[in-house]
Amino acid sequence: MLHLFASVLFAASFGSCELPAGENVLTQARFLPVYEREELVGIRLNGIRSRSYLACLRLRDEDVVIANNGDRIDSNAASAEFLKRLTSGKLRSLEVRRGDRVVTLD
C-alpha cells in the first residue's frame, strides 16, 4: 500500500518544512508498525535522514507516531490515512511517543 503514496509531492503545513521536488518522503526513514498486546499502537520511524522533511518536522529516530491530526493510529486503515496525510501535506499535528513520554509536534 505504501507505493500508492510514493510519488506525491507537496509543501508541508508544518511551518517552513517542505518536501523538495522529486523527493519521496517514504524513502527518508523506515516506517514500522508497533504492536502492544497484539494491537496496533503506532508507527515507529527508524533511520531518519538528517536534513530531510521528517527531520524538519522534528521527528527523531525511534519516535513512535501514535496519532495524527488527533486521530489515533490503531488500525491498518488509520496507518494508511497517516501515510496519505504525510505524503499530501495535510498534517496539522503529530502525537509522538518519545521514550517514556508523549510529545505533540505541530
Image (spheres, rainbow, N blue to C red):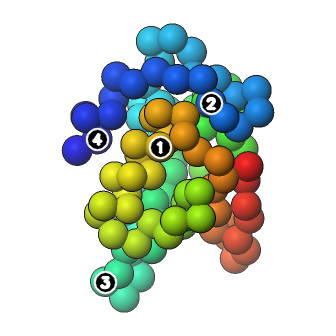
Which comes before the other along the chain, label 1 or label 4? Answer: 4
Of residues 25 and 106, the one nearer the viewer is: 106
Neighbours of disc 1 within 10 Å: few (<14), some (14-19), many (20+):
some
Question: Is the C-beta separation of discs 4 and 2 under 8 Å?
Answer: no
Q: Work out whether residue 11 can be spotted.
A: yes
Q: CA distance from mark 4 to mark 2?
A: 19 Å
Give the structural element (helix, strand or loop) at label 2: loop
Q: CA distance from mark 1 to mark 4?
A: 12 Å
For the point 69% across and 76% down, the residue is: 100
Q: Amino acid at mark 4?
A: Leu
Which comes before the other along the chain, label 4 or label 2? Answer: 4
Write down the residue under mark 3: 38
Neighbours of disc 4 within 10 Å: few (<14), some (14-19), many (20+):
few
Q: Amino acid at mark 3?
A: Glu
Marks 4, 2: nearer the viewer: 2
Write down the residue under mark 1: 85
Indicate the quadrant where residue 84 lies: top left
Write down the residue under mark 2: 12
What is the count of numbered marks?
A: 4
Q: Amino acid at mark 1?
A: Arg
The x, y position of residue 101, in whole percent, is 73, 74
Q: Which mark is residue 2?
A: 4
Q: CA distance from mark 2 to mark 1?
A: 10 Å
Of residues 62 and 10, the one nearer the viewer is: 10
For the point 46% across and 21% down, the residue is: 9
Indicate the quadrant where residue 73 lies: bottom left
Which comes before the other along the chain, label 3 or label 4? Answer: 4
